[in-house]
Amino acid sequence: MFRNFQLALLFLTEAQKGASSSYHPYILTLPRHFDSLVHWSDRELEELQYGSTEPEQQFLQEVSALLQHTVKASGYALHSAHPRDA
């Protein structure tokens, strides 16, 4: 933990130096902002769940209906390997 603190302090010190820092080119590549799931609300985390949004549910229903129609039209049954086995 202490080493992480030292590293953070080093970066802050070097960032303060700006272009005169030997770390300046590297510091420029670091993100200025980041988002972490730790800071997300329960509602935001819930939205990550598969099929949790209304458009996703509608899409899944449409795909399911299309698949069922295609299977019926082909003469195959979902549990069967061949039409004659249905």
Image: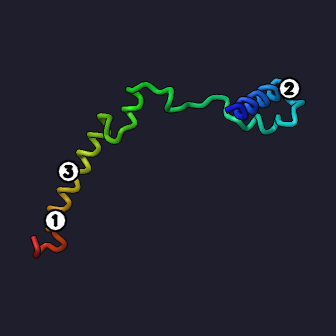
Q: Nearer the viewer, mark 1 or mark 2?
A: 2
Within 10 Å of disc 3 (Cα), the crowding (few <14, some 14-19, many 20+) is: few
**Dot label at residue 79:** 1
Rendered image quadrant of residue 3: top right
Quarter of the image for the C terminus: give it.
Answer: bottom left
Q: Nearer the viewer, mark 3 or mark 1?
A: 1
Q: Indicate the position of residue 8 as horizontal and vertical percent values.
A: 73, 30
**Dot label at residue 65:** 3
Image: 31 above or below 63: above
Q: CA distance from mark 2 to mark 3?
A: 62 Å
In the rendered structure, which amino acid carries the disc numbered 3? Ala
- Identified at 63% across, 29% down, the residue is 33
| 5 with respect to 68 (left or right) | right
First in sequence, mark 2 or 3: give its number. 2
Q: Indicate the position of residue 7 as horizontal and vertical percent values.
A: 75, 33
In front: 43, or 75? Answer: 43
In the rendered structure, which amino acid carries the disc numbered 1? His
Q: CA distance from mark 1 to mark 2?
A: 68 Å
Q: Is the C-beta separation of discs 1 and 2 under 8 Å? A: no
Task: Tell me the SS state at disc 3.
Answer: helix
Q: How many marks?
A: 3
